[in-house]
Amino acid sequence: MRYSIPAPIAHETLDGEVVILDQESGTYFSLTGAGADIWAQIVAGADDEQIVGFCETSFDGAVADEVTALLARLVADKIVVAHEGAGS
């Protein structure tokens, strides 16, 4: 599964924190730490398997469930759109 960021979503990374704004609803989100690293992987075009692999290497452990949960939350909140493809 790959992810894209829909048009009404604006995002900026400042001092390791990702600030995300849904310009339609006015809702904003903040990601720090591993969440910010996962966001960077999404922006770079990584698929879900690449994101999990990156996190497991970077954080020295099995984190697949946590990464998958965050990705599912981002999709549910319409911050990213999931697309079938590599890593699905």
Image (cartoon, grey):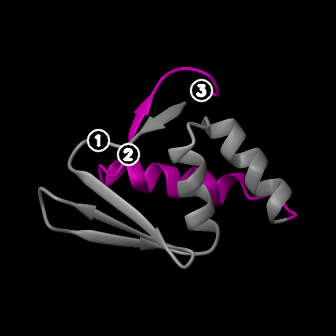
Residue 87, percent from left and from top: 64, 28
Please report the residue visible at 33 percent of the width from the left and 52 percent of the height from the top: 79
The residue carrying pointer 1 sits among few (fewer than 14), some (14 to 19) or many (20 or more) residues within 10 Å by Cα, namely few
Three-letter code, disc 3: Ser
Three-letter code, disc 2: Val
Mark linked to residue 88: 3
Q: Is 35 inside the magenta-drawn segment?
A: no
Q: Can you say which quadrant of the picture contains the C terminus? A: top right
Three-letter code, disc 1: Pro
Mark 3, secondary structure of its residue: loop
The residue carrying pointer 3 sits among few (fewer than 14), some (14 to 19) or many (20 or more) residues within 10 Å by Cα, namely few
Looking at the image, residue 85 sits to the left or right of residue 65; the answer is left
Which residue bears the numbered disc 1? 6
Which quadrant of the figure has residue 69?
bottom right
What is the span of residues highlighted in magenta in the rendered image?
A: 60-88
Looking at the image, residue 81 sits to the left or right of residue 61; the answer is left
Whether pointer 2 and pointer 3 mark residues with C-beta atoms closer than 8 Å, the reply is no
* Measured Cα–Cα span from mark 1 to mark 2: 6 Å
Looking at the image, residue 66 sits to the left or right of residue 63; the answer is left
Please report the residue visible at 61 percent of the width from the left and 35 percent of the height from the top: 47
Q: Is residue 46 above or below residue 29?
A: above
Sequence-earlier tag: 1 or 3: 1
Q: Which residue is nearer to you in this view: 70 or 43?
A: 43
* Measured Cα–Cα span from mark 2 to mark 3: 15 Å
Mark linked to residue 46: none
Sequence-earlier tag: 2 or 3: 2
Which residue bears the numbered disc 2? 80
Q: Can you say which quadrant of the picture contains the N terminus? A: top right
Residue 67, percent from left and from top: 62, 55
Q: Nearer the viewer, mark 1 or mark 3?
A: 1
Please report the residue visible at 34 percent of the width from the left and 50 percent of the height from the top: 76
The residue carrying pointer 2 sits among few (fewer than 14), some (14 to 19) or many (20 or more) residues within 10 Å by Cα, namely many
